[in-house]
Image (cartoon, helix red, strand yellow):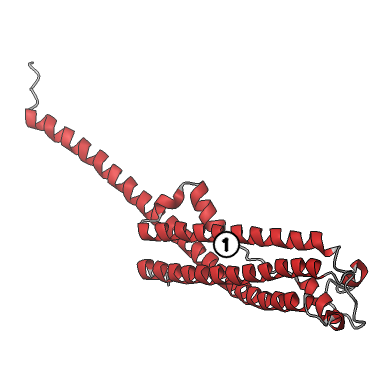
Amino acid sequence: MKKKKTPWWGNFKDFFLLFLAVFCGFLADNYRESLSNKTIEKEFLLSLVEDLKSDTANLNNYITFKKMKGHLMDSLAIMLVDKDHHLLGNQIYYLARQVFNESPFVYSDGTIQQLKNAGSLRLIKKRVIVEELLKYEKKVKVLTDWEENESLTKSTFRVMGGRVFNSQALNATMNEEMNFVIPTDNPQLITDDFQTLNEMAFQVHYLSKMCFGNSMRATSLRANAINLLELIQSEYQLD
């Protein structure tokens, strides 16, 4: 008995059904991947928001501290070259201790480092967010570089300090609990040489201006952090 030949449209139908099944599977996989990426993107953004909020709070404290320290350093520089500096020992030694008092800005970079190291910046679909985030990170680097310059100035003060301050008197301005203590016995500088005192005052004035400069840089950085938070909210409505 002769086998009946399958019409050509039957073969096409089978091929079409097979193609449709594969194509639908491909669409389903893409859909699942899209949902997964959106979930990961949202998790990263929520984490980034928390980092930026932490940065904003840290910058508030940093700005206040740097402004206060700048004023203290100006006072110290003036007292060092005052003709009656021998009457100002308590204040001078207390302020000299403040040179090494610090409240550094601690950058909350956990999320951005994770995004960069894992190559996951591509998951953030709103490219304007990525661009502003990278700009923000560059401004953080500028601030940290200036903080290093400030540390170099303090190192110069430390080197020169042995020619100006009585080491025991300066050491007594901090107690065992690491709290600052104002002297009460009017400790004296170990030199009255104006050139030496003027050189020290110059370094302290320079430190003051660096404190004020870093407070201005931190203020600008804080504005960027706030703007980035607002941009993320406007683009993603995370609440």
Position of residue 7 in the picture relative to residue 210 (left or right)? left
Q: As drawn, which residue projects farthest toward the top?
A: 1
Mark 1, residues whose alpha carbon is within 10 Å: few (<14), some, or many (≥20)? Answer: some
Query: Which residue shows up at 13% across the image and 29% down it?
Result: 11
Location of residue 93 in the rendering, given as x and y in whole percent from the top left corner: 83, 75
* Depth order, front residue of 76/27: 76
- Residue 47 is left or right of residue 166, and the answer is left
Q: How many marks?
A: 1
Residue 173's spot in the image, x, y percent?
A: 86, 74
Q: Quadrant of residue 159?
A: bottom right
Q: Quadrant of the C terminus?
A: bottom left
Query: At 82% from the left edge and 64% from the top edge, which residue is drawn?
Result: 161
Task: Please indicate, yes or no, whether residue 176 appears anywhere in the rendered image.
Answer: no
**Which is more toward the observer, 165 or 94?**
165
Residue at 88 percent across and 73 percent down: it is 189
Give the percent coordinates (x, y) of residue 205: 68, 71
Query: Nearest the camera: 18 or 47?
Result: 47
Above or below, comparing residue 5 to residue 186 in the picture = above
Which quadrant of the view contains residue 175?
A: bottom right
Quadrant in which the N terminus appears:
top left
Q: Which three-letter amino acid code belongs to the residue tagged 1?
A: Leu
Residue visible at 60% across and 57% down in the picture: 145
Residue 10 appears in the figure: yes
Can you identify the residue that label 1 sits on? 143
State the image coordinates of residue 94 (x, y, percent, origin top left).
Answer: 82, 77
145 lies left or right of 92: left
| Element on which disc 1 rests | helix
In-image side of 197 versus 166 (left or right): left
| Above or below, 116 relative to 166 | above
Front one among 48 and 75: 75
